[in-house]
Image (tube, grey):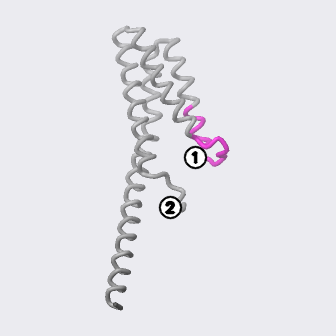
């Protein structure tokens, strides 16, 4: 993979934040099921659905590689799962959906850290190159 193929660290941070919010809403869904709070459950699954739609829309619509296809299938599975949670008041399904998206969130967090390191290294290399050029220019003056 080329460095230019990686998302920026800011893009990756946004995706991680979306996954964090998704997991909060899935945990809220479980809590609402436990409390028999139907309205709260619908609000939590609705918020989770909104986030999943944002993540889904962020996928490359032309992408046919295995990662994109697999991620697309996972998002669609979780979207369908959210509907089933509301129909069946299914705590296990909500927990299962959280377990499914957690590894993807962790992968994005890792990518975020790597993108940040790459950006830092690139900035350092640019500064070092500029300092070297300035030193060479001063030596020739």
User: Few, some or many C-alpha atoms within 10 Å of disc 2 (few <14, some 14-19, many ≥20)?
Assistant: few
Q: Name the residue under label 1.
A: 67
Residue pictured at 54% horizontal, 57% vertical: 5
Find residue 135 and report its horizontal and vertical position in percent. Answer: 32, 83
Residue 103 vs 119, above or below: the answer is: above
Task: Say if the magenta span includes residue 69.
Answer: yes
Q: Residue 3 carries which label?
A: 2
Q: Quarter of the image for the N terminus: give it.
A: bottom right
| In the foreground, 26 or 11 | 11
Q: x, y (%) of residue 89?
A: 46, 12
In the image, the segment drawn in magenta is: 59-75
Say if mark 2 contacts mark 1, CB within 8 Å. no
For residue 130, what is the image quadrant?
A: bottom left
Q: Nearer the viewer, mark 2 or mark 1?
A: 2
Q: How crowded is mark 1: few (under 14 residues within 10 Å), some or many (20 or more)?
A: few
Residue 118 drawn in magenta: no
First of labels 2, 1 by sequence position: 2
Work out whether 22 lies above or below 62.
Answer: above
Which secondary structure lies at badge 2? Answer: helix
User: From this viewpoint, which residue is outermost toward the bottom?
Assistant: 140
Seen from the viewer's position, the closer of residues 12 and 140 is 140
Q: State how far apart marks 2 and 1 are (Cα).
A: 18 Å
Along the line of sight, which residue is nearer the eye, 41 or 122?
122
Residue occupying image coordinates x 60% and y 35% = 73
Q: Secondary structure beneath disc 1? A: helix
Query: Which image quadrant for residue 56?
Result: top right
């Amino acid at each position: 993979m080329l460095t230019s193929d990686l998302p920026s660290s800011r893009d990756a941070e946004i995706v991680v934040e979306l996954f964090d919010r998704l997991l909060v809403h899935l945990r809220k869904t479980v809590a609402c099921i436990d409390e028999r709070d139907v309205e709260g459950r619908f609000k939590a699954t609705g918020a989770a659905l909104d986030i999943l739609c944002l993540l889904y829309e962020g996928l490359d619509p032309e992408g046919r590689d295995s990662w994109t296809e697999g991620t697309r299938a996972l998002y669609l599975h979780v979207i369908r799962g959210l509907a089933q949670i509301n129909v069946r008041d299914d705590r296990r399904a909500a927990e299962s959906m959280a377990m499914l998206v957690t590894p993807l969130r962790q992968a994005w967090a890792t990518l975020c850290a790597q993108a940040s390191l790459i950006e830092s290294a690139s900035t350092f290399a640019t500064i070092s190159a500029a300092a070297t050029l300035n030193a060479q220019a001063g030596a020739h003056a």
